[in-house]
Image (cartoon, rainbow, N blue to C red):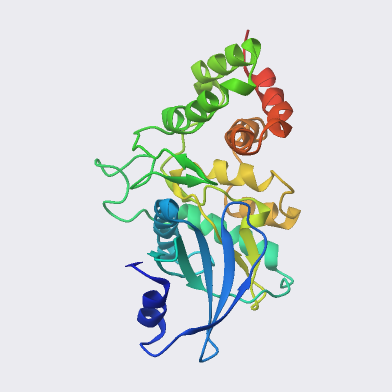
Amino acid sequence: MKYTSLAEAVRSICGQQRIITGKSPVFGGDINEAFRLTLDDGTSLFMKSNALGLLPAFEAEEAGLHAIEATGAIGTVRVLGTGTDSDGFSFLLQEFVAPGKKNRDYWERLGAELYAMHSAPVPAGKVGEKGSGFGFGADNFIGSRRQKNTWTDQWIPFFRDCRLRPQLKAAERWLDHRDRKLADSLLEHLDQYLIEPKAPSLIHGDLWAGNVMTGSDGRAWIIDPAAYYGHPEADLAMTELFGGFAPYFYDSYFACSKMEAGYQDRKDIYNLYHLLNHLNLFGVSYLSSVQRILRRYGRT
């Protein structure tokens, strides 16, 4: 639900008499400010905020969170609403999940739950006009950059035109002539590396270690999605980027679904998207990683 002030949101969600009595920062994100809101009855809420113009990013995140929650397969923090406030900020409100310590089966359970989410039936009417396809109901955001989600009948053209091509275009200022030729070659020959899935799967879209938290129940909760219907390998690949998940996670996931031959090669191409995004967001420190992948898969 969309609200026209933070106070209105609190009253609607928690009761007409409720007011905010405390606000403390929660650290960890790069794009938004995050806070724990304490109400006069002791209730806690989690709020992310940013400039007014970034409300669409929160609305897109809300849609992704609802889609993940609807699978009933994996822990994700329930979203309560989005809105703007006259003090000059947009916000997203969620339930507050207190942090805790990992259960002994934390990683095994997360692997099985992610497989269940990837395998969940797609709700009727949620995937493209023809009932199948790759994309999402609207564009969303990967960090602060817009993520194109135009419905496409096949996965490889979707990943080429809605994922790699826009990021490569934005990264041209960082790439030399050779790199740009290699990028063009990779796009042209992408079908020689990637494979089509049997059907679209709902994926988190930004599933690195920082977007998984441990709740007070000891379970994993996935947060901050850039969700869309795609290939599960794109999620799995990113779990290996920026720190990676524990081996037990992969053992559990692939106990449910056999790893298809060639995944170890394909994962770098999937992660090229995220490395390009980081190059475009944060600059030259990501250039060598991008070049390594272009020079491995591109042709001169």
Q: Is residue 27 above or below residue 19?
A: above
Q: Is residue 63 above or below residue 105?
A: above
On the image, which quarter does residue 248 sit in?
bottom right
Image location of residue 155, percent across then percent down: 43, 34
The answer, for residue 40, to whether it is visible in the render is: yes
The answer, for residue 76, to whether it is visible in the render is: no
On the image, which quarter does residue 72 sit in?
bottom left
Image location of residue 150, percent across then percent down: 35, 37
Q: Residue at x 73, y 27 (%)?
A: 288
Q: Residue at x 55, y 75 (%)?
A: 96
Of residues 155 and 275, the one nearer the viewer is: 275
Of residues 163 and 267, the one nearer the viewer is: 163
Image location of residue 12, percent across then percent down: 35, 80
Q: Is residue 230 above or below residue 291?
A: below
Q: Residue at x 38, y 82 (%)?
A: 11
Q: Residue at x 65, y 38 (%)?
A: 282
Image location of residue 55, percent across then percent down: 41, 55
Marker count (numbered) = 0
Quadrant in which the N terminus appears: bottom left
From the viewer's perspective, is 99 left or right of 170?
A: right
Outermost residue to the top? 300
On the image, which quarter does residue 221 sit in?
bottom right
Quadrant in which the C terminus appears: top right
Of residues 150 and 229, the one nearer the viewer is: 150
